[in-house]
Amino acid sequence: MRAAILTVSDSRSRGEAEDRGGPALAQFAISIGAVVVARDLVPDEQSEIEAQLRLWSEECCDLILTTGGTGFGPRDVTPEATRGVIEREAPGIAEAMRLSSREHTPLWMVSRGVAGVRGRSLIVNFPGSPKSIPEAGAGVRDGLVHAVELLSS
């Protein structure tokens, strides 16, 4: 399973803050058996997010994971960018991530992340907090592996 990790953040893309979400998400991907073949960092710009998601899905990444840009901030546009490139939404994945986060934070319901399929790639939006990545990921570990297997068959 080939995975790509995209961090979405204005401040991190400008070098004003350390990207801790990308490494946490890469560790999650490795923990489910993926090989991380690409990583990038983009600002909260819908067109840039969409372009990277399209590129990686066309390069046959099986799993594309994003971190950041899923909240209610005016520049949080990762879900909109993801919806702009996916062909089929996978609402159960995003729902399971939110439910898994529920036991860890009372703010679980303000994550707007989505998941879906473009070609043979599964794209999943994770929250931006490094702490929340394994918490949200716990609810979808097996499902992500199964979905990628189905897409590759």
Image (tube, rainbow, N blue to C red):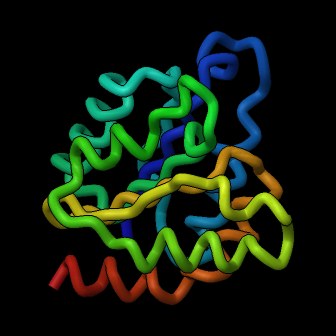
Seen from the viewer's position, the closer of residues 13 and 136 is 136
* Residue 114 found in image quarter: bottom left
Seen from the viewer's position, the closer of residues 73 and 37 is 73
Image height of 52 relative to 112, above or below:
above
Quadrant of the image containing the N terminus:
bottom left
Image height of 115 relative to 50, above or below:
below
Write the residue at 67% across / 45% down.
128
The percent coordinates of residue 2 (x first, y second) are: 37, 63
Instruction: Describe residue 89's horizontal placement relative to residue 73 as left or right.
Output: left
Instruction: Describe residue 3's horizontal placement relative to residue 44 as left or right.
Output: left
Write the residue at 38% across / 32% down.
49
* Residue 150 found in image quarter: bottom left
Seen from the viewer's position, the closer of residues 9 and 27 is 9
The percent coordinates of residue 30 (x first, y second) are: 59, 67
Quadrant of the image containing the C terminus:
bottom left
Write the residue at 61% across / 19% down.
10
Write the residue at 63% across / 30% down.
73
* Residue 21 found in image quarter: top right
Instruction: Describe residue 11's horizontal placement relative to residue 70 as left or right.
Output: right
The percent coordinates of residue 5 (x first, y second) are: 50, 47
The percent coordinates of residue 70 (x first, y second) are: 56, 44
The tally of labels here is 0
Image height of 29 relative to 71, above or below:
below
